[in-house]
Amino acid sequence: MQDSGFYACLFAYPYDTTQKTFVPRVVARDLAGNERQAGIYYRAKDKTFRRRQIKISDSFLAQKVPEFESIVSEPGEPIDIFLAVNGEIRKQNRALIAELGQKTAPTPLWEGPFQRQPKPRRWLNLPITGPITIRGNPSIIKFTWGKIWRP
């Protein structure tokens, strides 16, 4: 809560939600447990994200997989470790981020407006969906922002 007695909240617009189905609501709960919900005025803008094929070589796997072997529960082939890291480990990380997001600070941790980082690299234009090609096989695994799986 601010010194003025007002709260502030930022809403994320999920990338896989359409403008028509995105309906944010404010939920307020006081110390006695009384709860109230209300709709808010907002402006959501649909955006189409590009599809892209990502090619992962054996040399990339050989270079990166050793970094992850210690965090994967079961050792295995490089492709299995890659899938475990980009599947189960990412799922665990998203759960931890969601848990940490529940523990908000009572005051803003920044001052002024958000500004763009100087000279950022824009090559990804996230989120991206499409196939990941390993060993020339584009159907071995597929990805959507934050999710990688075997078909």
Image (cartoon, grey):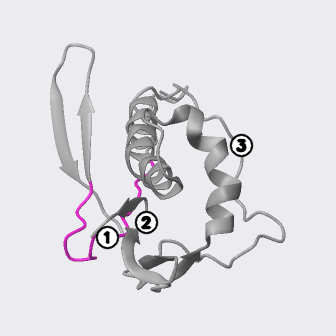
Q: Is residue 54 left or right of residue 90?
A: right
Residue beneath the point at 47% across and 86% down: 50
| Sequence-first disc among 2 and 1 | 1
Percent x, y for residue 91? 38, 44
Say which quarter of the image contains residue 9.
top left
From the image, tell me which residue sits under label 2. Answer: 145
Q: Which mark is residue 96?
A: none
Task: Farthest residue to the right: give it.
Answer: 119
Is the residue under label 2 in contact with that under label 3 (CB below 8 Å)?
no
Q: Whole-Å distance between the Cαs marked 1 and 3? A: 30 Å
Camera-nearest residue between 27 and 6: 27
Neighbourhood count class around disc 2 (C-alpha, 10 Å): few under 14, some 14–19, many 20 upward: few
| Sequence-first disc among 1 and 3 | 1
Residue beneath the point at 38% across and 60% down: 147
Q: Which residues are magenta?
A: 10-24
Q: Secondary structure at mark 1?
A: loop
Mark 2 or mark 1: which is in front?
Answer: 2
